[in-house]
Amino acid sequence: MYITAERCLSVLTPLKIQRIVTFERTAVILLFIFLLNVSSFLPLYSSAYFSWNFNPSQNKTTLGVSFYSNKLIIEGIINRFQASLAIIAFVLVVLFTGILAINLKRKSKWRRGVTSNKNQQEALSSRESKTVGMIIVVAVVLIVCYTPGVTCSITTSFIPDFGITGKQANVFHAVWSFCFLFHAVNSSINVLLYYRMSSKYRTTLREIFPMLRKELTNGTSQTLEVTIN
């Protein structure tokens, strides 16, 4: 959400973006977002305490974790809060992406009107179309990958049995295993999307990792050799 907002500001206020979005402000905002997410789980730990519990299968008393009677209420509040954060993030990502795409298309149309060189017009139009496409794809991947987790959080907040210790605990764990898989896909696939769709990102990555550039050169040489033969 923050990255999409930063991109949106970069297009709306290109001359002021460096003064608005500084390194210090970005660090503070990201730290606040992290602490907000982590702090939402603190009430759950406040409902737990250590106690001695008798284990019939082992016929002995062991030290374990017990919960107060308000555990289900606290879990419901936490799930609703997490779902609210995710829904707000989704709405803002869609909003910022829409604003960004509309403004890029407007600027692309304006540049085509003031540029007389036809080849330059086509180059600018192609580049900006790729930029809009990349932004939309990244936003769609984010929404698709996080929708299952948000849905599960909303379901748990209204149906307490669909929880870690509820009657539907097995289904809960099975569903959330796929949700975490989607989260991992979202965290991993962005590198491939940027590498495939952004020439600047691809060039920078090759400068950082020369191995990629060598593999590309070898692959191109082999292709040319096969074509000549």
Image (spheres, helix red, strand yellow):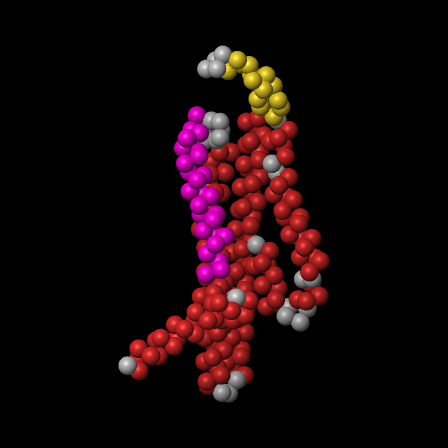
With 49 as the anchor, is 130 left or right in this view?
Answer: left
Instruction: Determine whether 146 is above or below 163 in the image.
Output: below
Q: Dividing the picture into quarters, in which one does residue 68 lie?
A: top right
Q: What x and y, as percent, mark residue 201? A: 52, 67
Front-lying residue, 58 or 98? 58
At horizontal 47% and vertical 79% (from top left) the residue drawn is 123
Front-lying residue, 184 or 124? 184
Task: Assign the C terminus to one quadrant of the image.
Answer: bottom left
Question: Does the magenta portion include 187?
Answer: yes
At horizontal 52% and vertical 60% (from top left) the residue drawn is 97
Instruction: Determine whether 93 is above or below 101 in the image.
Output: above
Q: Which residues are magenta?
A: 167-192
At horizontal 51% and vertical 87% (from top left) the residue drawn is 116
With 48 as the anchor, is 160 left or right in this view?
Answer: left
Asked whether residue 106 appears in the rendered view, the answer is no
Q: Dividing the picture into quarters, in which one does residue 226 lie?
A: bottom left
At horizontal 60% and vertical 31% (from top left) the residue drawn is 44
Q: What x and y, as percent, mark residue 165? A: 49, 27
Q: What x and y, as percent, mark residue 155? A: 47, 36
Task: Assign the N terminus to one quadrant of the image.
Answer: bottom right
Instruction: Find the residue positioned furthest to the left.
Output: 229
Asked whether residue 86 appears in the rendered view, the answer is yes
